Amino acid sequence: MHRRVTALLLLVIAGFLGGLVLTGRMRSASDGAAEPPAAPPAQSSRPGAPAAASPLPDLTGVAERAIASVTNISSTQIVRRSNSPFANDPFFRDFLGDDPFGYREQRAQSLGSGVVVSPDGYVLTNNHVVREQGAEVKEVRVVLPDKRDLLARIVGVDEDTDIAVLKVNASGLPTLPWGDSSKLKVAEWVLAIGNPFQLNQTVTLGIVSATGRSLEGRLATYEDFIQTDAAINPGNSGGALINARGELVGINTAIYSESGGYQGIGFAVPSNLARHVMDDLIKYGEVRRGTMSGIWLQWLTSDLAERLGVKSTHGVLVIRMDQRSEAFAAGIRPGDVITSFNGTPVDDGSHFMRLLSDSKIGSTVTLGLVREGKSFSARVPVVKSTGSTRRR
């Protein structure tokens, strides 16, 4: 009897202890589920670590507002064309002189885009949209997004930057706010808006591929382009390049293409430059720029730099001079390489032209030069540009 009671007591104690163990496990599981989740591992702060993926920005509102300020532009021109079968051959043009085959006049039309920049009707576009070189402009018309077709007056054009300013008789027009193009960063989102192939108010998305781009004078004399991969095609010229805040940061100007269509390389005149040109054209009827008279320049190549004793292709080569010029009197000679401008290193010919053009007329600048491997400096006065600074 005593043994049975003892065995029963042991069974009760064992069951009680088992219940404690099971309850403890269940409580542990329950408590664990109720605890806040463990913090995610800290992201690496080392340079170059990939950032967390972020969704693309919603630019629908920005595009909707911007479209209302982008116009369609058509220009009717009279173009004088040669009857000669050799008209496109430079050898025969030089040999024959005045064309003995005569000329004919043809009516031509160019199409492009423009941007309304003031409520009272000032419109920015490209010079090449308004007129071909040597053509006589008969009429320029601006078609607004609300379908109004207005006759435009040419306020002024600047071939050096390929910018033109038009004026239409209208008021209360929607405009784009100006952006500061100097603050653009590579890989920043941008929208290109224009009328490619007469497809009105077309919007394309891309990024800033590069800033301060120079093409060695192939597009304009004064080159400081924004490069973008936003799709730009024929008809986009003169249209708006805007940032993600809806600000105008550039005027679309050209594309690089081997096919005639989009290949991911487009160029725009920065808004800061376009605004300066516009203000001068409205105020003075011309763009006031500084220059050095009687000096001809050429971009440096690696071969030229080596022969001239220059360590790199940064700089610009003086290839010819007028002996009556201030630059000649200051000691500059053909074969010299200009390497700095008032202490600022010169990247290339376009950079030098920008620095010179932006200089105050009547001031004196200090140029750093290299001649036969030796460095020296010269002080040269800046005069008003009359087209005397030439490039080959």
Image (cartoon, helix red, strand yellow):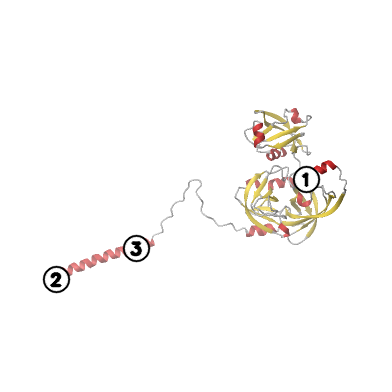
Q: Where residue 214 appears, x then y in whole percent?
A: 67, 43
Q: Which residue is mark 2?
A: 4
Q: CA gap, disc 3 to disc 1? A: 80 Å
**Which mark lies nearer to you, 3 or 1?**
3
Q: CA gap, disc 2 to disc 3? A: 38 Å
* Three-letter amino acid code at the position of disc 2: Arg
Which residue is drawn at the image coordinates 70% and 34% (left, top)?
Answer: 317
Considering every residue shown, the one lying at the far left of the view is 1
Which quarter of the image is occupied by the N terminus?
bottom left
Q: Which residue is mark 1?
A: 283
* Three-letter amino acid code at the position of disc 3: Ala
State which quadrant residue 384 falls in. Answer: top right
* Three-letter amino acid code at the position of disc 1: Lys
Can the viewer see residue 61? yes
Residue at disc 1, secondary structure: helix
Q: Where residue 73 appears, x then y in whole percent?
A: 76, 56
Q: Which residue is mark 3?
A: 29
Q: Is residue 2 above or below residue 211?
A: below
Considering every residue shown, the one lying at the far bottom of the view is 1
